[in-house]
Image (cartoon, coloured by chain):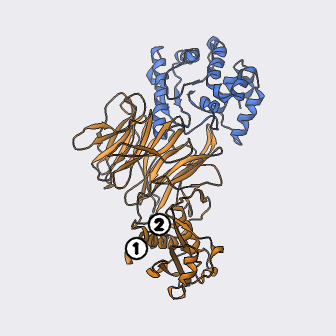
Amino acid sequence: MKSLMTAWLTATLLLVSQLAQANLTIEITRGNESATPIAVVPFAGNEALPDDVARVVHDDLERSGYFDPLPRRQMMDQPSSADEVRYANWKALDVRYLVVGSASREGNGYRLRFELMDVSGEKRMLGEVVTASGDDLRGAGHHISDQIFEAITGIRGAFSTRIAYVTSQGVGNNMQFALHVADADGHNSREVLGSPEPILSPAWSPDGRKLAYVSFETERPAIYVQELGSGKRARISSFEGINGAPAWSPDGRRLAMSLSKDGQPEIYVMDLGSRNLQRITNDAAIDTEPSWGPDGRSLVFTSDRSGGPQLYRHDLASGEQKRLTFTGGYNARGRFSPDGEALFLIHGSNKGFQVARQDLDSGRLVTLSQSGADESPSVAPNGTMVIFATQQGNSGVLGAVTADGRASFRLPSAQGDVREPAWSPFMN
Amino acid sequence: MQFKPYARSLAVALSLAVLAGCSSTGGSQEGSMDGTRSGNGSGVSSSGVSDGRTSGSGYGGTASGTSSTSGQQADGRIPQQRTIYFAFDSDRIRSEFEPVLAANARYLRENGNVRVVLQGHTDERGTREYNMALSERRARSVEQFLSVQGISPSQVEVVGYGEERPAARGQNDQAYAQNRRVVFDY
């Protein structure tokens, strides 16, 4: 708990000076019919505070697709501690789990207490006091959501994580691009980099402290690494031609990338300490979009060596390369699930371009997203959700879908196009 | 804005795409695109407007009708046609655009101190980094064409912009056709 609080304080400090101006809002587009009914009662004392903590928890749990939170107006009473709970009331509403709590100011921050109840068993499963320094009440809510999610599902919650994404406005030579970082629910966004030239392919370092990305700020593509805390940045690859698709190795010491300095785009691995390059592919085709296996022993990448884009796996020890995708003529930008058992990718068919999951053992491919204009899938660190770029009307927005495709939501922005989402690793 | 010279040119429909690609004025690009489109509402471009599904081929037809104009231009001025268009997921130069390339090659040959950046672009479909690669491949196929025409490699640079700088917005075949392009940026 103590280390959690420390990490959390760090996150809070990072956010203190940032005004939330271009937040993304959540729209649930498809609920999961088998989601577990839960009720999150408004926290006693919360009225006097700037954010509604129970609402944050309610929204987190709903967005996960695992839970179906009860609307507040249906609650018969609003207990704030376990001994006030009348289980019969909640059973009558078919609620399986119940969250109650209280919130108050304490010193420069807040003190939150919450309890999680199993309604059918009439027992308390979890109770915790959370102190938050600074003004990050929402962060405290996400922390509570993480505890509840893990206590019920057995899966580590990813509500306290963050997303990076790129926005753009305008067309042709008159455009503005910006790289942003926000909480996983789209709140607390802040601009990391703004430019009149394209920015793409943000990638989080495994410790969550740095972003690698491609920026055209010199009017040529180059790969940069930027520390989020200090804002300090370095240009680490600016060869002639494409410098693209940076991907951190799981140990954070190497960066896979696509470079066309020798003609066609090829996959390389750069040692970040020495900046030495190791060439991975060597052919006359496009080779790009590398992604590391969670064990760091293989890379998956997109290649059109067979005629159209398909995914291939390169074994770093043996150098062996093997084609992985055979369903349809367009499969690109693969990303491993955290357990390494599946790939999330963009699958092109007569329905357009959709997020799909392919199980590596069976080779079976299932499409997950609904629209036909999807790109850039990025997997939550707990593997339960995939965030991606999609279209709503004529605007680019972010969408997310559960890894089983059963529930989805969108994160529209008030202005401009949003794309290139990258889900952070766990921050603590 | 170099609107007037373009309006005078015969290359009505194609020039609107060039305009979009080269425009650097402020304000609503999308709005000005629409305005340009309706302002040039000739028979040539209306097929594309009325039926997005056929706009790709409409573009090709337009270019072949106009290319003789640029082909005849042999003074020291930058050729008016500086954009050529491609089929989906293709870097093959369509024969109707060869006169455009020839005019630009002639200009580069006659002006040995001039340098050009070949900016490759794709439409928005498919993944961004793959499109980055595809756009560079398009620009390289133009570079290859220029090289065969005897243009010094030192005059030519290639940059792939992928789908990052669309000339036209919208999820329809007409916008896609306008965006799959290589622009001569002098």
Q: In this view, does A84 lie to the left or right of B54?
A: left
Secondary structure beneath disc 2?
loop
Closer to the chain start, of discs 2 and 1, is 1
Tell me what hue chain B is rendered in.
blue
Q: Do labels 2 and 1 share a chain?
A: yes
Q: Where is residue A41 in the image (x, y as percent from the top left)?
A: 58, 77
Chain of the residue displaying label 1:
A
Q: Chain A is drawn in which colour?
A: orange
The answer, for residue B31, to whether it is visible in the render is yes
Q: Residue most toward the left? A: A318
A409 left or right of A151 in image? right
The location of residue A76, given as percent across then percent down, is: 63, 80
- Residue at the image point whose x is 61% and y is 25% from the top: B56
- Mark number displayed over residue A4: 1
Q: What element carries label 1?
A: helix
Q: Where does the N terminus of chain B fall, quadrant-wise? A: top right
The Cα–Cα distance between marks 2 and 1, rounded to whole angstroms, is 11 Å
x 60%, y 84%: residue: A45
Do the residues bearing badges 2 and 1 touch, measured as CB atoms within 8 Å?
no
Whether residue A173 sits left or right of residue A423 in the image: it is right
Quarter of the figure with residue B177:
top right
User: Which residue is tagged 2?
Assistant: A160
Looking at the image, residue B8 lies above or below residue A351: above
The x, y position of residue B91, in whole percent, is 49, 25
In the image, is residue A11 above or below residue A177? below
Q: What residue type is labelled 2?
A: Ser
User: Which quadrant of the structure image shows residue B163?
Assistant: top right
At a point 60% along the width and 74% down the height, the residue shown is: A52
